[in-house]
Image (spheres, grey):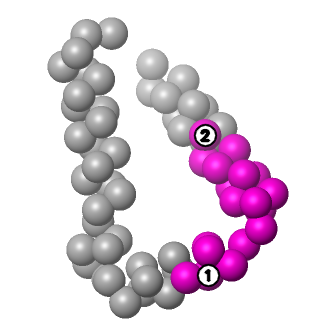
């Protein structure tokens, strides 16, 4: 993998992460407040699911 691909993927991640707070900051704040209330195991499971989906999508794209 070259650095151009890596930085393009990193830039896309930043763009996607910034969309919701930019478009709907009040909704983002409510969602974030609810996430803070979750336990560690729930957050860890959601992180695992996100990682697994991302890896599956990347595998399908290649």
Which residue is depicted at the point 77% across and 68% down? 39
Magenta stretch: dominant secondary structure: helix
In the picture, residue 34 is in which quadrant?
Answer: bottom right
| Magenta-drawn segment | 33-51
Q: Is residue 15 above or below residue 29?
A: above
Which residue is depicted at the point 62% across and 74% down? 36
Helix, strand or loop at label 1? It is helix
Name the outermost residue toward the top.
1
Tell me if 29 is positioned left or right of 22 in this view: right
The image quadrant where one finds the N terminus is top left
Helix, strand or loop at label 2? It is helix
How packed mark 2 is, by other alpha carbons closer than 10 Å (few <14, some 14-19, many 20 or more), is: few
The image quadrant where one finds the C terminus is top left
Q: Which mark is residue 3?
A: none
> For the residues carrying marks 1 and 2, which lies nearer the camera in this image?
1
Q: Does residue 49 appear in this view? A: no
The residue that mark 1 highlights is 34
Q: Nearer the viewer, residue 39 or 54?
A: 39
Q: Nearer the viewer, residue 53 or 10?
A: 10
Q: Does residue 23 appear in this view? A: yes
In the picture, residue 28 is in which quadrant?
Answer: bottom left
Instruction: First in sequence, mark 1 or 2: give its number.
Output: 1
How packed mark 1 is, by other alpha carbons closer than 10 Å (few <14, some 14-19, many 20 or more), is: few
Name the outermost residue toward the right.
41
Tell me if 5 is positioned left or right of 49 in this view: left
Asked if the stretch drawn in magenta spans residue 46, the answer is yes
Tell me if 26 is positioned left or right of 59 in this view: left
Which x, y percent locates residue 35? 61, 73
Asked if the stretch drawn in magenta spans residue 32, the answer is no
The residue that mark 2 highlights is 51
Which residue is depicted at the point 57% across and 31% down? 55
Which residue is depicted at the point 18% across and 19% down? 4
């Amino acid at each position: 993998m070259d650095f151009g691909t890596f930085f393009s993927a990193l830039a896309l991640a930043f763009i996607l992460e910034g969309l919701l707070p930019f478009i709907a900051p009040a909704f983002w704040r409510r969602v974030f407040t609810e996430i803070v209330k979750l336990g560690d195991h729930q957050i860890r499971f959601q992180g695992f699911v996100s990682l697994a989906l991302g890896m599956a999508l990347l595998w399908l794209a290649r």
